[in-house]
Amino acid sequence: MTHKLITYSLFVALLLAIYSCAVGPNFKPAEVNEPVDFRYNIQQDTVINLNWWELFKDPVLDSLITTALNNNRDVLIASSRIEQARAVLGVSKADFGPAIGYSGNLTPTNYPQYVTVDEVTGNYSFQAFLSWEIDVWGRIRRSNESARANLLSLAYAKRATQLSLISEVASSYYDLLDYRTRLVIAQNTYQVRDSALTIIKLRYEKGIIPLLDVNQAEVQSATAQVAIPLYQRQIAYTEHRLKLLLGDYPGPVPSPATLIEKKLPDSLPAGLPSDLLLRRPDIIASQYDYWSQHAKIGVAEALRFPTISLTGVLGYGSPELSDIISNGLGWGVQGSLIGPLFQWGKNKRRVDIEREGTKQALFSYENTVLNAFREVDDALIAVQTLKEELKIKEFRYKAAESASYLSGLRYDKGVTSYLEVIENQRQTFAAKLEYSQTYKEVFLAYITLYKALGGGWISESEREEYAKAYEEQMNLEENSVRRDTLIYKGQIPNLKTPNKN
């Protein structure tokens, strides 16, 4: 009994020793020396809102984003890729266990050795077999590690796709509001100028003013009129783009108000730079891409060593079909070792290929991080400067309106020429259009900032699961943490991280 126990213990210890080693380097997360602060950061005590678009307080935008997240084809493709990667991981996991199969053979004949005989002879057999590759060098484990990291990369890539989609929908929505605002400005300006043209024509017919004033008024009226179909076309294009993002065919998109009626967000969220590495899904996805590629080095390294397999066969066989069972059960066990001896450096080059691929994945990750910080600083300076620009342009268009009104009074009293009137009208029209455009650009700058900071969307069930995991980690009572105050930093609670072998 003691001898058997020692034997079993040695066997278990041997298996543990085999499965505790794996060739190839173990993964270590890339180190990034991020800056202490963003260059244009003015607040560090705030964090990005989970559903950041709700800061705009627009129910129409909320509805559009919800529809897009459910129906957009790019998001559905990203979801399908996750399921595909999950299946690939399942295939990789299956290599850990033995392959079990069966085979049968039925060959009756009266033509053995190419000679016809009276008796029917043949061979009848049926067997089950088991084949198991012992993962001594960690090839299967490294392959499994790579597949799991790839699954997580695609999961975060879906987050990045959702984040980009939200930003595109919001940007297109404010583009639409801007074009509708400009259309209203063009229509109102045309109505005013067309009414003025009618009065000027009557004055000309009475000989009060020259024909030049009529022609100049006609030019001004046509300038406003030609802008109407221009913005109508831009509205249609933008609606069609929005409908595509919503996963729908071209059609109208309702919006309850013009752009100027929308209030700009009050706060400017930023956060510490280290949070950016935890929040941006593209950075996390790139990190897992690096991990996945890193594990392939171990797979390539394992191919340089012999493969050890065990095969077992259990079955029946007989030259007579009626005796196939009575002849008794047969069995066989075979161990095999197959390895490369001399292949002109092929296996070494496989390792070199994966090492260089890992270097590229690391550089790609570092470039993603660098680009993320650039995007944040670009967005921060854009928000700050565009808000200042908006104040100046508001002052400009109000001054232009006043000047246009006063020049009209001066012209009616014969103090100045019509040239002064049309110049002030031109400046007023341009100032209003530019103000609307800059107002939109401020919204777009906020959207770009929220996207650059990694603000994104998770479902209510995911939020609840994350909250429960957080309470458990912090040893808090159940439901003691307010769900709307949690800072979601990219975690995906329903997926496990790869094993670090």
Image (cartoon, grey):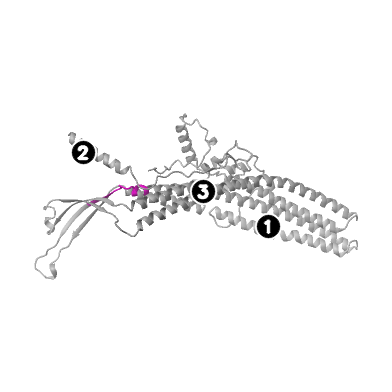
User: Spatial distance from mark 2 to mark 3, Cα to Cα?
Assistant: 51 Å
Asked if residue 141 lies in the magenta stretch, the reply is yes
Residue tagged 3 = 366
For residue 191, which quarter of the picture?
bottom right
User: Spatial distance from mark 3 to mark 1, Cα to Cα?
Assistant: 42 Å
Residue tagged 1 = 231
Read off the magenta span: 129-142
Q: Earlier in the sequence, mark 2 or mark 3?
A: 2
Residue tagged 2 = 7
Q: Looking at the picture, how far across and down is residue 433, in whole percent?
A: 72, 53
In-front residue for pair 352/241: 352
Q: Nearer the viewer, mark 1 or mark 2?
A: 2
Q: Looking at the picture, how far across and down is residue 279, in whole percent?
A: 53, 42
Quarter of the N terminus within the rendering:
top left
Asked if residue 290 lies in the magenta stretch, the reply is no
In-front residue for pair 244/307: 307
Count of numbered tags: 3
* Amino acid, disc 1: Tyr
* Amino acid, disc 3: Glu
For disc 2, the neighbor class at 10 Å (few under 14, some 14 to 19, many from 20) is few
Q: In what element is the residue under mark 2?
A: helix
For residue 221, which quarter of the picture?
bottom right
